[in-house]
């Protein structure tokens, strides 16, 4: 299972969602501006504007709920796949010959050059244990090799779970419009802040 592909699918789903919400809120803004400019022809301007805004709000809420549900459905199905992929990645057995060679390097305190370490990376790629072992050998030889950080991976998965909570309440650059349309709930900016 390709973790990068799953994350990319989730990222595309989130970007599609943001685009949909921005479009809805932009339409709402344009509708309010149009209604404001047209209501001067009515005897009770305030009542007519309130009526038009209520219709615009209902339309925007419906469209945003639809976008929320689509995002939630697309991404929520990927979360278990990401957890499975993480488990498979962590528990995959490394190549015994590669591990034996690294064990020999450590046991006999052999010194490896940077180019020798770089030549070993392809043999360790795709296997957590092999990368961690190679990281240890690199550190012993005064070099830094960054192996995947499982805590960061789990943090990203949890961030995805938080990002698709329903309702998502994304506002983008339309914070005031989102506050009007979604006035009964907190509005989250792109960075997750309220």
Image (tube, rainbow, N blue to C red):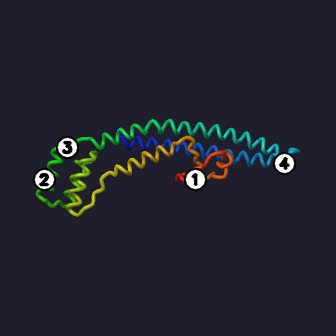
Instruction: Give the numbered dot on residue 121.
Output: none
Q: Residues within 10 Å of mark 2 (few under 14, many from 20)?
A: few
* Identity of the residue drawn at 78% across and 41% down: 51
Residue at label 1? Answer: 194
- Distance from disc 2 to disc 1, alpha carbons, whole Å, reads 54 Å
- Distance from disc 2 to disc 3, alpha carbons, whole Å, reads 14 Å
Q: In what element is the residue under mark 3? A: loop
Instruction: Give the numbered dot on residue 40.
Output: 4
Residue at label 3? Answer: 95
* Identity of the residue drawn at 21% across and 59% down: 115
What x and y, as percent, mark residue 176? 66, 52
- Compare residues 144 and 26 and report the one nearer the observer: 144
Viewer-side label of 3, 4:
3
What x and y, as percent, mark residue 23? 62, 44
- Distance from disc 1 to disc 4, alpha carbons, whole Å, reads 36 Å
- Distance from disc 3 to disc 4, alpha carbons, whole Å, reads 77 Å
Residue at label 2? Answer: 104
Q: Earlier in the sequence, mark 2 or mark 4?
A: 4
Quadrant where the image shows the N terminus: top left
- Distance from disc 2 to disc 4, alpha carbons, whole Å, reads 86 Å
* Identity of the residue drawn at 74% across and 49% down: 33
Q: Earlier in the sequence, mark 3 or mark 4?
A: 4
Viewer-side label of 2, 4:
2
Q: Are marks 2 and 4 in contact (CB under 8 Å)?
A: no
Viewer-side label of 3, 1:
1
Q: In what element is the residue under mark 2? A: helix
> On the rendered structure, is 95 left or right of 25?
left
Q: In what element is the residue under mark 4? A: helix
What x and y, as percent, mark residue 149? 34, 52
- Compare residues 137 and 151 and report the one nearer the observer: 151
Q: In what element is the residue under mark 1? A: loop
Q: Earlier in the sequence, mark 2 or mark 3?
A: 3
């Amino acid at each position: 299972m390709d973790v990068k592909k799953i994350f990319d699918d989730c990222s595309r789903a989130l970007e599609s969602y943001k685009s949909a919400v921005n479009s809805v809120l932009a339409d709402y803004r344009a509708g309010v501006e149009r209604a404001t400019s047209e209501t001067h022809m009515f005897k009770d301007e305030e009542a007519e504007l309130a009526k038009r805004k209520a219709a615009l709000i209902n339309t925007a809420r419906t469209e945003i709920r639809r976008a929320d549900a689509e995002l939630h459905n697309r991404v929520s199905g990927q979360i278990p796949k990401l957890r499975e992929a993480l488990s498979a990645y962590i528990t995959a057995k490394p190549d015994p010959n590669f591990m034996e060679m690294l064990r020999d390097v450590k046991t006999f305190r052999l010194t490896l050059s940077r180019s020798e370490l770089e030549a070993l990376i392809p043999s360790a790629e795709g296997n957590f244990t092999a990368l961690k072992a190679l990281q240890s050998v690199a550190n012993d030889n005064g070099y830094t090799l960054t192996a995947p950080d499982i805590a960061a991976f789990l943090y990203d998965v949890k961030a995805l779970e938080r990002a698709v909570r329903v309702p998502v309440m994304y506002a983008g650059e339309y914070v005031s419009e989102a506050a009007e349309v979604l006035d009964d709930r907190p509005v989250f900016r792109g960075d997750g802040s309220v």
